[in-house]
Image (cartoon, coloured by chain):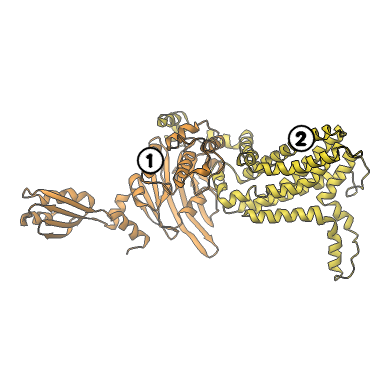
Amino acid sequence: MSALELRSLQKRYGEVVALRDVDLTVRRGEVFGFLGPNGAGKSTTIDIVLDYVRPTDGTATVFGLDAQQEGERLRQRVGALPDMRLFGHLTARQHVQFVADAKGCDDDPVALLDRVGLGRVVDYTADGFSTGMGQRLKLAMALVGAPDLLVLDEPSTGLDPNGAREMRDIVREENARGATVFFSSHILEQVEAVCDRVGILSDGEIVAEDSIENLRDATGTQATLVVSVDSLTERAVAAVRDLEDVSDVVADENRVRVTCPDERKAAVVDAVRTDDATVLDIESDDASLERLFATYTGGLR
Amino acid sequence: MTDTATSDDTATSDETTNGTGRPPDTATDTAADSITGRLGALSVLGRRSALDPVRSGNGYVTVVLFLLVAGLFAYTQADSPQVTFSNIVGIVSMVAPFLVVVRCADALAADRESGRVRGLLALPFSRRQVLVGTLLGRLAWFVAAAFGTLAVALAVFLARGGVVDPTASLVGFGLLCLQLTVYVGVAVGVSAAVATTARAVVVASAVWLVTQLFWTELPVLVSYLLNGFEGATRPEWADTFVALGPLAAFETLSTAFVQGGSVRPVLGGEPWSALVVLFVWFAAPVLFGLRRFERASL
């Protein structure tokens, strides 16, 4: 049984179609990134899984539990970080304790707050928290009871780079203990860094569902590599041109520019050094993921 | 350091069965389905809702308003020969609906408007549990606030040499609790039915206005409209209609069981039939609110 399954999920708000026909399977034990531009329908999808809104058609199930029919049992096994507001007059500790009471588990609130970096403000009320602190608190609430599935809606919203990295570390730790993680994001680096697979949602439809490498291969998006050396020989340039999967080779004075897949970069550098040239600089334009995203969501075609 | 804690949980909890590909349904499902599980959910939600006015610091307004009415009357009326303490309880009962409507209409609507209710419903609660838990919690808070202020009023009353009629006062307090129950039901029901605090306050206040102030005038008003604005006669159904209002029902109970006077039969029956009327006034808004809340997009 898969961790999360969406079958022919549709949602219309009057004339507006939020989800057209979404089919998606998140396997047990994987970290799944749910990508898409703003307004693609990511939040609507998560809202249906958590039963905040009812689908016009189709089903959402988590570990075989239907989101509409068996919502309470479903949410017993899910740690969720939805788009929500905190209770301003409650302390961080009271928030986490409330979730522990709700789920009937005896997790130590202080330990969880320590883990998300709020160990020093456990007894402060949430109305004094910054967006980033609020996000950390929501994460701590999602972690209560070691849930089998984490559903995180844009978890890094409001976090600084350090916070975002810590968030990723926690996602990895949770995954390592056996949790499945499903998180939505429009930030590609976040997704690439932790996800086993991604689904790309565009205009209410899943336009791609695969690992990032496979998606790259499928779209043929490649990196641009520029290698500068102290002296560039004809033989070296010829060696580069002879490499498989390497194209658009342009050589001028002491630099070679090529377009190639990620895994061919080392071979290109080796070829440039055919006559024992010393490498001065390597520049790699790694916007490939951006391009990949744009290709699927219609931003660049 | 907390990582070890969580991995320990993993080893001991139902995660072990996950490896086999079967969900650990038995453990979690029975917990969520059992009666104790449901009561647990209600007590968690109820406690939150009851403590909310205290923790947020807004509850003092309610206490001050109760205290103003009860304390002022206890202070000024203590030496009046025909006033006993049960009269003070009765006066608090008359203002209670207004206080509840004003102070409780935001119960669910504010959480819904702000998105806090999404946080509650990310947890293993049903919407019905959230509504019932909120209702029980708020009711507990109002009963406690009324009890506390009446205790203060009693001290003032005694100190000023007032006459206390214990039985009538206790029955009167019971009726006050009944009155609170009906209007917490109205306020929470309305609050669950609408999406914003502003609407909840307007609708709940309107219900208070109609049921507490204008109910007895409604039959004449209707007759006035039906007669084309020319002379109003009191329609035949007026008495029955008035008896079906929460105000008359409360007064019937109060007269029959506190003051000990004779009352008109309620719908041709005993005075306690008024309890049925009050129950309907409690249950109808709650069920209406529940129906709307369960279908709402949050």
Determine whether A91 is above or below B116 in the image. Answer: above
Residue A259 image point, x, y percent: 20, 57
Residue B42 in percent (x, y) is at: 63, 38
Which corner quadrant of the image does residue A104 belong to?
Answer: top right
Q: Dividing the image into 4 quarters, which one contains the N terminus of chain A?
A: top left
**Chain A rendered in what hue?**
orange
Chain at numbered mark 1: A
What's the residue at 91%, 49% (across, down)?
Answer: B268
Write the residue at 27% across / 57% down: A221
Check disc 1 and report the residue beneath it: A166
Chain in yellow colour: B
| Residue at screen point 42% across, 31% down | B2
Q: Amino acid at mark 2?
A: Val
Q: Is residue B108 visible?
A: yes
- Regarding residue A70, the answer to whether it shows in the image is no
Q: Is residue B131 left or right of residue A269?
A: right
Quick check: marks 1 and 2 in contact, CB under 8 Å? Answer: no
- The residue to which callout 2 is attached is B152
Q: Nearer the viewer, residue A199 or A293?
A: A293
Q: Given the image, what chain letter belongs to the residue carrying mark 2?
A: B
Q: Tell me which amino acid carries mark 1.
A: Glu
